[in-house]
Image (cartoon, helix red, strand yellow):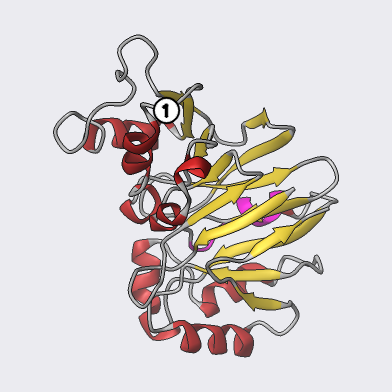
Amino acid sequence: MKLQILGCSGGIGGGRRTTSLLVNDHILIDAGTGVADLSIDNLCLIKTIFFTHSHLDHVTCMPFLADTVFSRHNHQVSLRGLPETLAAIKNYVLNGTIWPDFSMIPLVYPLLHYLPLHLYEQITTENLQITSIPVSHSVPGVGYLVDDGHHAFAFSGDTTNNHTFWDLVATCPRLDLIIVEVGFPDELLQLAKISGHYTATLLAEDLSRFHRSVPIYITHMKPGLEPIIMQECHNKILNHQLLTLSDGMIFDLS
């Protein structure tokens, strides 16, 4: 299984890209601004987009992807996410006013296909089993566990304190790495709680019940605050290997 980090920042500026993960060339998890760095040929390979939630930094390049590939496509692109997430995309983005509705274009063989998924649902696609895991954010959201039968990784999406994500990923025997967001420094703890994000202190609380020895990559840090957030994570979380996720990283899980 190949995992490529197209974008992992909590914002833009200075070359930063917002959240998007490419799995085995055909699957996106979220479609933030990092998608824009793919070539046209690589964009045409995308078959499924799994959304963690509806916020703009996680969906913003999906309309442009559709507009780029629709005249070249020889397969439909499936949009997978919670019903609330897909409804937000359909009603507020691909609504014919903000952007064309590519579930109706081209007329004979529309490009996009909405396929709602539910909490804890396991989807098998491209020889992968992808499980949606409920998390706690300011809008309905999920994380994902991606498993090819030999190797696996977990991605929290945007979340603050929750047990569901950690309890489920702890049961996966093949877990190679975890990608988890820490959006804010501890001085913005109350804002993090209100907006549904981790700080180092909040993540430390959840990791106190997670006893697996798995590398944990920190993502979605606010631009310019990355050194502060990572230092706080290292100060607060002593029993886990913490690493900084960066745009362009490639993991060959084989």
- Residue 183 higher or lower than 137, as above or below: below
Residue drawn 47% across the image and 89% down it: 228
Query: Could you say whether the residue bearing mark 1 is in a helix, strand or loop?
Result: loop
Left or right of residue 151, residue 67 in this image? left
- Residue 203 higher or lower than 230, as above or below: above
Between 53 and 49, the residue placed more toward the observer is: 49
Left or right of residue 253, residue 56 in this image? left
Residue 26 % position (x, y): 59, 38
- Residue 179 higher or lower than 111, as above or below: below
- Sort mark 1 into few (<14), some (14-19) or many (20+) by Cα contacts within 10 Å: few
- Kindly indicate the quadrant of the structure image that contains residue 241: bottom right
Residue 188 % position (x, y): 36, 80
- Kindly indicate the quadrant of the structure image that contains residue 213: bottom right
Residue drawn 52% across the image and 37% down it: 46
Label 1 sits on residue = 72
Amino acid type at mark 1: Arg
Residue drawn 58% across the image and 40% down it: 27
Q: Is residue 38 visible?
A: yes
Residue 130 % position (x, y): 66, 38
Q: Is residue 248 magenta?
A: no
Extreme-left residue of the structure? 97
Q: Is residue 163 visible?
A: no
Residue drawn 61% across the image and 76% down it: 204
Residue 200 % position (x, y): 54, 79
Extreme-top residue of the structure? 108
Q: What stretch of residues is rendered in magenta? A: 160-168
Give the number of callouts. 1
- Residue 160 higher or lower than 44, as above or below: below
- Kindly indicate the quadrant of the structure image that contains residue 224: bottom left
